[in-house]
Amino acid sequence: MTFASRWGRFGTALGVAGLLLAAGCAKGTTPGAAGGGGGGGGDIDEKAPVTITIGDRPTPDKPNDLKAFNQKVKDFMAKYPNITVKSTETNWQAQTFQAQVAGGTLPTVMSISFTEPANMIPNKQLPDITDELKLVDMTKDLNPNVLKIVQDDKGRIYGVPVDVFSVGLAYNRNLFKQAGLDPDKPPTTWDEVRADAKQIAEKTGKAGYAQLTTNNTGGWMLTTMTYSMGGSVESADGKKSTFNDAPTKKALQLLKDMRWTDNSMGSKFLYNQEEIRQDFAAGKIGMVMQAPDAYDMSVKNFGMKPADFGEGALPQDGGPHGTLTGGTLKMISPKATKNEIVAALKWIRFDQFDKYTGEAAAVADAKTAIADKGFVGRPGISPLSQQTYDQYQKWIQPYVNVPVKQFQGYIDSTTSLKLLPEPPNKGQEVYSLLDPLVQQVLTKKDADVDKLVSDAASKVDARLAR
């Protein structure tokens, strides 16, 4: 699930510290390493003619995006004349993706959700690209913590993370001031959230806290709360539900108490992503779980004053358990030959990373963002290694146009909280089955939390067994 839309883009910017993975191998003609590489055998010849197909081509109803995409492809082929690039509109959709994998109809390279590798790697549906990543000199630029999403238990790599998000707590600094709260000290525990929400509601008449509830977002954010309370939603192998226990029940009871006992959640309880951001930007909501990219839509689309936006850590209960993370990675077809894998990685680097690894590209990208009334330097989680990120930040520093200090609570959390992945099996389907739990505790005063959770666990178990 994303914060900017139901499936689509994810926020990036601020890296998570970690040790760099080693990079090596000289460029040129290289023998394929044992145990590495993709579906095709033989040596790698970087000068040999090769054709790849890339997915995610913009549709004709987005002419500006399509024009920019086609120009990038043209520029890439000019830089690498031995690589021919074809393109397709194929993109990741939760309901159809596995059928495409089974049918062998995927392009050479395309974007997919972080929810996929956990199943695809053991099923050998992704090629081992560890050696090819070193060959094209990309490994050193990648965040080793984020790379874990696409690694097996031996540390081999099967994809390239390109966009990452993690959930924090967005809050309205102006409502905090009106309620007599310190806007530089957002709550860091759920008990503090409850107290602050009640104070905001009593002092301002606005909803102190609001919760996403529809279009799979209710289950998504209930999963996030469960993580923050020390629980989980699925077993590691994705075969059984694990949420019929204290953390999820405590999360639902907290929402029920805030709604019915404290009356601190306003009068609207059926929210999708865009609706909740619109009301948040309008000053109708004090706090809501969101990633930092909520800033972009709240300010640019809905007119929120930059000075009013704050982003803190995801509140925790009983210790620093962690926060839900997700994002987008580039997968390469398991049918790709070694030469095609190398060509695909060169495209990924050109398309996604050149703006981070070269000063001229970084500055040009920042200037373009400002010209488009976009934002430069908005914090988030980065797919980049700390070294690469730090260098990139120096290049763009003169162009930063976001009040970074107002994200300090979130920034601190990127090193203090674990990044916990979304459910590994049928994640979106699980979210849809959890939506009603959140809706019912907020709309039915007599909702039985234990029964709701137990019934949902049975439904999820049946779905996971299919």
Image (cartoon, rainbow, N blue to C red):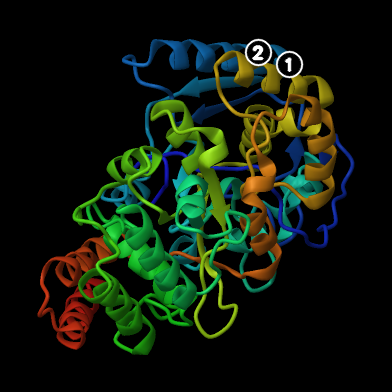
Q: Which residue is mark 1?
A: 79
Q: Position of residue 30 (x, y in %)?
A: 82, 43
Is 136 left or right of 425, judged from the image as shown?
right
Within-10-Å neighbours for mark 1: few <14, some 14–19, many 20+: few
Horizontal side of 150 relative to 110 (left or right) equals: right
Residue depicted at 12% across the width and 79% down the height? 447
Tell me the kind of residue under disc 2.
Asp
Q: Does residue 79 sit above or below 56 in this rendering?
A: above
Asked if 17 appears above or below 47 in the picture, the reply is below
Give the quadrant of residue 444: bottom left
Which labelled disc corresponds to residue 75? Answer: 2
Measure the C-alpha gap from mark 1 to mark 2: 6 Å
Amino acid type, mark 1: Lys
Q: Is residue 422 above or below residue 24?
A: below
Q: Is residue 162 left or right of residue 61?
A: right
Q: Residue at x 42, y 72 (%)?
A: 195
Depth check: 317 or 13 in front? Answer: 317
- Residue at 36%, 89% in the rendered image: 246
Please say if the residues under marks 1 and 2 sit with CB atoms less than 8 Å apart: yes
